[in-house]
Image (cartoon, rainbow, N blue to C red):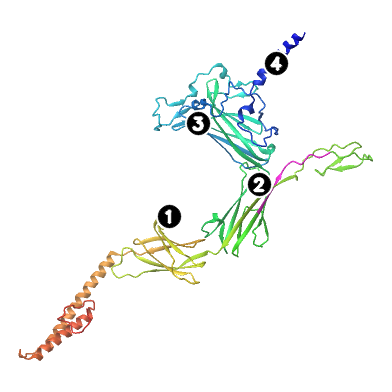
Amino acid sequence: MECLYCFLGFLLLAARLPLDAAKRVHDVLINERPSGYMREHRQLNGWSSDENDWNEKLYPVWKRGDSRWKNSWKGDRVQALLTSDGPALVGSTITFAVNLVFPRCQQEDASGNIVYEKNCRNDTGPSPDPYVYNWTAWTEDSDWGNGTRQGHHGKPFPHPAKWNFVYVFHTLGQYFQKSGQCSVRVSINTASVTLGPQIMEVTVYRRHRRTYVPIAKVKDVYVVTDQIPVFVTMSQKNNRNSSDETFLKDLPIMFDVLIHDPSHFLNESAISYKWNFGDNTGLFVSNNHTLNHTYVLNGTFSLNLTVQATVPGPCPSPSPRPPKTTPSSASTLKSCFSDSPVPAGDNALKLREIPDKNCHINRYGYFKATITIVEGILEVNIIQVTDVLMPMPQPDNPLVDFVVTCQGSIPTEVCTVISDPTCQVTQNTVCDPVDMDLGDMCLLTVRRAFGGSGTYCMNVTLGDDASLALTSTLVSIPGRDPDSLLRMASGTLVFVGCMAIFVTVIALLVYKKHKEYKPIENSTGIVVRGKGLNVFLNFAKMLFPGNQEKDPLLKNQPGIL
């Protein structure tokens, strides 16, 4: 009898060995468990428990560092990129996306096959076969022909002729299998997800005739929170750098609240924004996600924002009320969830769960920042534009003076941009330091050269360490008319000719008046003739002051050179 018991025990032990040796899903998919890992989680819709057995014949398991990874793909290893649109507000939907990155010169075609890119060369040179994996050409056996293949745990496996990759997602003690091409997306509702950071792991398999081969593993951390993810952008006119959270006094700052809600969970919610700007101006409550505020003092201020979203939701389940001591068939109760009367009896009441549209769930989000307010250039204006007069002929690059004024702090630099009339195509950019002492009044003249006649867009920017102020104007440079230049030249020639004739007549008259016969030895006559010639020359110099005689034999006054 003892031998019979031993034999039966041996049979039972042998029968249990395959079960003990069978791998479970969590043994395969989990590389390492973080601290505080919980085995018990609420069920995700459509996901399976990782306590199920793993079919290692269909989906082989390779540890990290296994040499078989090197041959899992032709050419090189495939990389898997896992991203999510978290952080996710609890109750919303979070979406995970996996994208496969193939080795160089490989891509997926419209049929799902992996082919070599045309005109792309890698280290191994061009391949005579255009396909890396031509899955559509593989012969389907009877196991695949019916479209699905039942695994030992009852889950249908994908039809390999259509989908060539299998993605196994694993998180919160559960897994989800999805087939697809080189990119897939999976979404889960976070209503049953534990708050805090969680890990999503994905293992990717490629089809290999009647089985699959692992090609990549990837994991990422995602966060589920009960606070609304809030971001605030701050912008201000004339502010040189908003990213340093330094802004200008006496100019409005625009605050724009961005709520991270990619699944549109809060679309039907009533959202309010409560602002405290830290400058003793009080509390501002708004239903608009944008708000302008102006600081009138310099200094450092603490900004606080509270976002409240009222989400319509189901009312909580009512608790049974204790039995009444004095029964009354005519007495009624009012449900706290409805105005409808509910009959009361002698025994414990079992209230009907009547939904009420006035039940809501409040969620909050918070934003804090410390901002600095300083002086800056508030405004700049061009008050006068004048041409710079140049001697004839007019230069090819006419000069124009711009008289510029500004309000606020005194600038330290001025930059100008000359462009086409649409202010789109830049032609010339010049920056100069403002090293002059302007005192308390911002008034300066900017001189710039233009490339010929035409209409230009002129941008003038004044700047200092904290601000940049810009103004623009259109400048019209008149052209030089060739006909007018010809007429001016002809008029000049006529004037010079007339003056030459007039001077000649005057010279003849003077010469005739002073001409008389004198003996050659009389020195007085030489002097008279010399005086007459001097009169003519002095008159000529008066008419042509630019023509100064340089001959020393003709000068009669000292210092003319």
Q: Earlier in the sequence, mark 4 or mark 1?
A: 4
Q: CA distance from mark 3 to mark 4?
A: 43 Å
Which amino acid does the dot numbered 3 rest on? Val
Q: Which residues are magenta?
A: 305-319
Q: Earlier in the sequence, mark 3 or mark 4?
A: 4
Query: Seen in the image, is 3 located left or right of residue 259?
Result: right
Q: CA distance from mark 3 to mark 1?
A: 45 Å
Q: Earlier in the sequence, mark 2 or mark 4?
A: 4
Q: Circles 3 and 4: CB distance less than 8 Å?
A: no
Front of the two marks 3 and 4: 4
- Against 28, residue 245 (above or below) is below
- Residue at label 4? 13
- Residue at label 1? 424
| Badge number at residue 228 | 2
Q: Earlier in the sequence, mark 2 or mark 3?
A: 3
Front of the two marks 2 and 4: 4
Residue 303 appears at what percent x and percent y? Answer: 63, 56
Which amino acid does the dot numbered 1 rest on? Gln
Quarter of the image with the C terminus is: bottom left
Residue positioned 51% across, 27% down in the render: 69
